[in-house]
Amino acid sequence: MSQQETPTLKLLLIGNSSVGKSSLLLRFTDDTFLPQDEVSATIGVDFKVSMMEVDGKRYKLTIWDTAGQERFRTLTSSYYRGAQGVILVYDVSNRDTFDALQNWYTELQTYSSSKDVVKMIVGNKVDKESSRVVTYKEGAAMAQKLQTLFIECSAKTKVGVQEAFEELVQKIIETPSLWQKQQAPASTIRVSSNGNDEQESSPCAC
Ligand SMILES: Nc1nc2c(ncn2[C@@H]2O[C@H](COP(=O)(O)OP(=O)(O)OP(=O)(O)O)[C@@H](O)[C@H]2O)c(=O)[nH]1
């Protein structure tokens, strides 16, 4: 299959600072985990490209890693533009990060360019079982409330990481409206739901 025929998907990682967004991305793309002293907070946005094969077809994933810290967040709406899948990350050993999911969800709903964007809540750091403060049941209930997919994982031990990305991509593939968007003309007008962000955008902002 030629490169041109490879569909490109835009995925986004959001969530509070230090929940492990960059670590999940690094584990998924490079199968690596950096020790604490080598990790630095994301400033603005970073992204990596990865290939994934689903049902014999190759997909190019552009995965955007956004800063959790408010002071490093700029151009928020542009992160979300054209994203087909969004992962909302919390840390199972930090309840504040779990409580913040509702706010991240609201931001996502505000800026997302498609109402059908596939959402997944990911509870990270399950290797820290002795410090766990958010149960699996609570995570699953939140996902049910917000109508998202749900998985627990650990960027450190790898558990659940591949599965999270695979499940998200599979669901995107099964959502025709996200694909119809991709087939639309390269230039379409989008008006965000808050009404103050009118712009021209490509259906695939990758
Ligand atoms: N034990 C454990 N530590 C983790 C895990 N994932 C990330 N960490 C640690 O958590 C800290 C924050 O990880 P980051 O990946 O930088 O978090 P982030 O969400 O990208 O943070 P921002 O860039 O500030 O938004 C680092 O010290 C990581 O080593 C995990 O699965 N288990």
Image (spheres, helix red, strand yellow):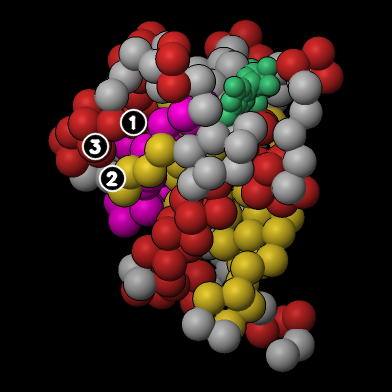
**Between disc 1 and disc 3, whose residue precedes?**
1
Q: Residue furthest bottom?
A: 1
Query: Is residue 67 shown above or below 45?
Result: above
Alpha carbon distance from label 1 to label 2: 10 Å
The residue to which callout 3 is attached is 140
Q: Residue 48: give its label.
A: none
Q: Residue 148: give its label.
A: 2
Residue type marked 1: Tyr
Q: Residues within 10 Å of mark 2 (few under 14, many from 20)?
A: some
Q: Position of residue 56 (x, y in %)?
A: 57, 85
Alpha carbon distance from label 1 to label 3: 15 Å
Is residue 187 rendered to the left or right of residue 113? right
The residue to which callout 1 is attached is 105
**Between disc 3 and disc 2, whose residue precedes?**
3
Is residue 179 rendered to the left or right of residue 34? left
SS class of the residue under badge 1? helix
Instruction: State yes or no: Cβ of the residue under disc 1 lies below 8 Å from any atom of ligand 1.
Output: no
